[in-house]
Amino acid sequence: MALCFPNAKIVALDAGVEGKDNMQGIELTNHIANEEGFNTIVEYGFSPQNTKEIVEKHFGNEKIDFVFIDGLHTNEQLLKDFYGVLDFCHKETLFLYHDVINWKMEKAFMEIKDYLTNYNSMLLYRTTSGMGVSMPKSISSDIQNVFLSFTENQQYVDILKKSLTTKAKIRGFIGRFLPKFIKENIKRMLG
C-alpha cells in the first residue's frame, strides 16, 4: 500500500496470532517502513477491541479514506471488523475485503452491501481470493472501472454455482452409494 500510495498515512492493525514469528514480522515491517521513509506503521492489537485507540492515536479526529479488512476469516468477524471501523470513516471511504469468496463470507458481505445503500458493493471473482469491494457511488468512473474489471457477469456466476452444486450432489450420492454397493457385491460374490 505504501508503494502504491506514497503520500498516504497507512496504519495496519495486526493481532500477531499467525505463528511464532508474527511479532518479529510486525517489528520488521515497521523497521523497513521507517528505513524507506514510508508513513506506515503496523500496530499490535485486535479488531474491533483496539480499533478506536489505534485510529485515534494515528488519525485523531481525521476520517479514514480507505479500509482494507483482512482479519479472521469468518462471517461474524468480517462484520465485527466492518462495524468496528465505521465511526472513523466518512461517506466517501472505500472498503476492500480480502478472501470473501474463498472463505465463504458472502453472507457477511451481503449484509454490508445492504447496509451501505449509497455504495456499489461487488464481489471480485477475478481476484485470486475472491475479494469484495464497497465503493461510494460518487467515486470516479476511472476507479470504478478498475474494480469492474475484476467482476463477473452475475448470470455466469449463477450458472457456475448451479453447476458446482449439482456436481457436489452427484459426488455426495456416489460417495455414499458406491462403497455400499461395492461391499454388498463383493460379499455376494464371495458368499
Image (tube, grey):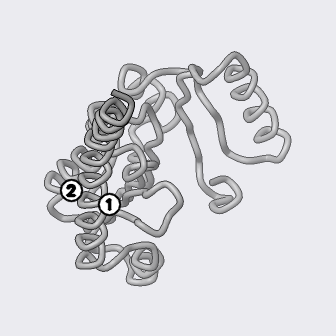
Helix, strand or loop at mark 2: helix
Q: List the residue tagged with mark 1.
A: 134
Residue 166's label in the rendered image is none
Residue 189 horizontal side relative to residue 12, left or right? left
Residue plotted at (64% across, 58% down): 7
Q: Is residue 132 left or right of residue 2?
A: left
The C terminus - image quarter? top left
Query: 106 and 165: which one is in front?
Result: 165
Which amino acid does the dot numbered 1 rest on?
Answer: Ser
Residue at 48 percent across and 38 percent down: it is 59
As drawn, 156 above or below 36: below
Q: Which residue is more in the foreground, 10 or 119?
A: 119
Q: Which SS class for mark 1? A: strand
Within 10 Å of disc 2 (Cα), the crowding (few <14, some 14-19, many 20+) is some
State the residue at coordinates (35%, 39%): 182
Residue closest to the eye, 7 or 107: 107
Residue 142, percent from left and from top? 45, 83
Q: Position of residue 173 (x, y in %)?
A: 24, 47
Residue corresponding to mark 2: 113
Q: Is residue 139 above or below residue 94?
A: below
Percent x, y of residue 138: 28, 74
